[in-house]
């Protein structure tokens, strides 16, 4: 069984980014991101309606973290504390050394290679210190940006599940992409 310990929080840095822990100060930015139906178009989670929804999301992130059951990084640009996105392993199957990855970026910063920098860093963390064996990504078939990002990082399409997910009154398809460790 995989044993995880996210204390102290692993702050990660890339050429342009600092990936740090979420705090309640990030609630207004997280609220802006998660209330936007365009950003959330392919993420089957309820939109945040109030700042309290964002505070509750940060509570959930911190509970998963303190229980060593999930880890989510807040994406910031070096030299600027402001949260511009998130990335993390939010669902972990310790018995299978496997985790599901999720990510989201403010559109003002999309198309600049930022998520590419973030994802390769947390893949290295996942297969390195975290000792994962595989990383799963569940993607909506229409989410071309996310599919491109995953393919670029050698994720392999393993299955297309038809109407397996019921959200907002609709049965949605899911494509599962997976990356196995090289270790
Ligand atoms: C998916 C997402 C994180 C990509 O972030 P990003 O920082 O814009 O991506 P990058 O700039 O690092 O691009 C990575 C690759 O994807 C490609 N890409 C990015 N956006 C694209 C788009 N809209 N259409 C096609 N390809 C796209 C880039 O061209 C790049 O490949 P390349 O280097 O071969 O050209 C971003 O679009 C997003 O936050 N979407 C909304 C939330 C979401 O859907 N999350 C995923 C849920 S599964």
Image (spheres, helix red, strand yellow):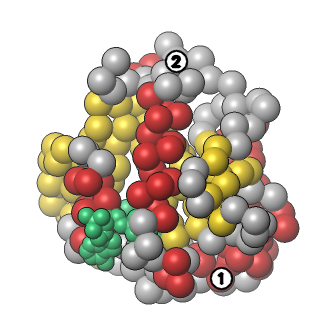
The residue tagged 2 is 2
Residue 81 quadrant: bottom right
Instruction: Please provide percent x and percent y for residue 65.
Output: 70, 40
In this view, which residue lies farthest toward the right? 25
Vertically, is 126 above or below 80? above
Mark 2: secondary structure: loop
Q: Nearer the viewer, residue 164 or 175?
A: 175
Q: Is residue 127 above or below residue 79?
A: above
Quadrant where the C terminus sits is top left
Ligand 1's image quarter is bottom left
Q: Earlier in the sequence, mark 1 or mark 2?
A: 2
- Tag shown at residue 141: none
Q: Position of residue 26 (x, y in %)?
A: 77, 68
C-alpha span from label 1 to label 2: 35 Å
Disc 1 target residue? 32
Q: What residue is at 79 percent from the left and 32 percent from the top?
A: 8
What is the secondary structure assignment of the residue under circle 1?
helix
Residue closer to the observer: 130 or 99:
130
x then y, percent, for residue 54: 71, 70
Disc 1 under 8 Å from ligand 1? The reply is no
Q: Relative to residue 141, is residue 103 drawn left or right?
A: right
Residue at the spot 43% in from the left edge and 46% down from the top edge = 120
Query: In percent of the image, x 17 and y 48: which residue is there?
Result: 157
Could you tell whether 89 is left or right of 67 in the image?
left
């Amino acid at each position: 069984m995989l044993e995880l310990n996210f204390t102290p929080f692993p702050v990660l840095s890339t050429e342009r980014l600092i990936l740090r822990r979420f705090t309640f100060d990030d609630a207004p930015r997280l609220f802006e991101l998660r209330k936007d139906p365009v950003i959330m178009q392919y993420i089957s989670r309820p939109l945040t309606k109030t700042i309290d929804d964002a505070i509750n999301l940060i509570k959930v992130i911190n509970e998963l973290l303190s229980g060593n059951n999930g880890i989510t990084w807040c994406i910031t640009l070096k030299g600027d504390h402001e949260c511009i996105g998130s990335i993390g392993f939010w669902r972990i199957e310790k018995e299978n050394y496997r985790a599901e990855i999720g990510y989201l970026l403010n559109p003002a910063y999309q198309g600049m290679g930022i998520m590419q920098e973030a994802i390769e860093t947390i893949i290295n963390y996942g297969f390195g210190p975290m000792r994962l064996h595989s990383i799963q990504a569940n993607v909506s078939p229409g989410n071309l940006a996310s599919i491109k990002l995953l393919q670029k990082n050698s994720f392999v399409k393993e299955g297309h599940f038809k109407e397996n997910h019921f959200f907002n009154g609709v049965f949605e398809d899911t494509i599962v992409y997976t990356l196995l460790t090289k270790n």
